[in-house]
Amino acid sequence: KVLQVVTAAGNTQLNTNSGTYQDLSGMSLNITPSSTSSTILLTHQFSYIYAANNGAGFGSYVLRTVGGSSTIVQAQSNAQTYINYKDSGEQFQTVWNEQLYDNPSTTSQINYKTQVATYSSSTVRFNFDSIYYGRITAMEIAGWL
């Protein structure tokens, strides 16, 4: 049984080559579970494009914060998101979609947000396409998992 659904959207582009994880603007939401046994189904998506490069890659995760304490719900490793280019004139663009399950075991307010970082000094532009602006959704599911 779905108890509540909260969605947030981000339409601000982020053009970065930083290896430090940073927020995707607008892709942050708050949800307060009604039970400690609830599971939170999280989905997040965003568009991205790599500039022409010999190698490019990024990592993303959803960060959960409860009462000032933060935990990564899921992180992507370099190998999972690393893209190699054969020709320096190529570009690569697509949409990142991910679905995660979280069991926070709390009835306190939770903040979930999407963060991204690049690898190998890649230049990546996130939320570049107005058709696929970023979106994060949290769905509370009663007593599941």
Image (tube, rainbow, N blue to C red):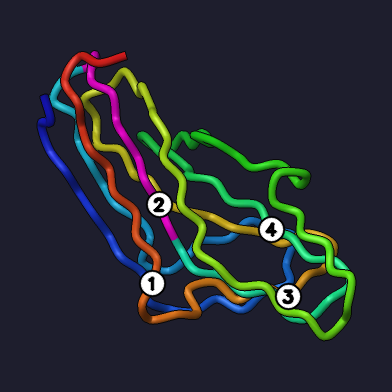
Q: Which mark is residue 123?
A: 3
Residue extent of the magenta highlight: 36-45
C-alpha gap between disc 2 and disc 3: 21 Å
- Please report whichever mark, 1 or 2, sits nearer to the chain's N-terminal start: 2
Residue bearing the label numbered 2 = 44
Q: Which mark is residue 133?
A: 1
Q: Which mark is residue 58?
A: 4
Q: Nearer the viewer, residue 69 or 86?
A: 86
Q: Is residue 82 above or below residue 111?
A: below
Q: Please give the name of the residue rendered at 40% of the width and 51% of the height, measured from the top-left corner.
A: 44
Asked if the magenta segment contains residue 121, the reply would be no
Q: Secondary structure at mark 2?
A: strand
Q: Secondary structure at mark 1?
A: loop
Find out whether the residues at labels 1 and 2 contact each other: C-beta distance under 8 Å: no
Q: Please give the name of the residue rendered at 84% of the width and 68% of the height, measured from the top-left corner.
A: 85
C-alpha gap between disc 1 and disc 4: 17 Å
Find out whether the residues at labels 2 and 4 contact each other: C-beta distance under 8 Å: no
Q: If the image is split into quadrants, where does the C terminus sit?
A: top left
Q: Quadrant of residue 20?
A: bottom right
Q: Is residue 98 left or right of residue 15?
A: left
Find out whether the residues at labels 3 and 4 contact each other: C-beta distance under 8 Å: no
Q: Is residue 144 left or right of residue 58?
A: left
Q: Which mark is residue 3?
A: none
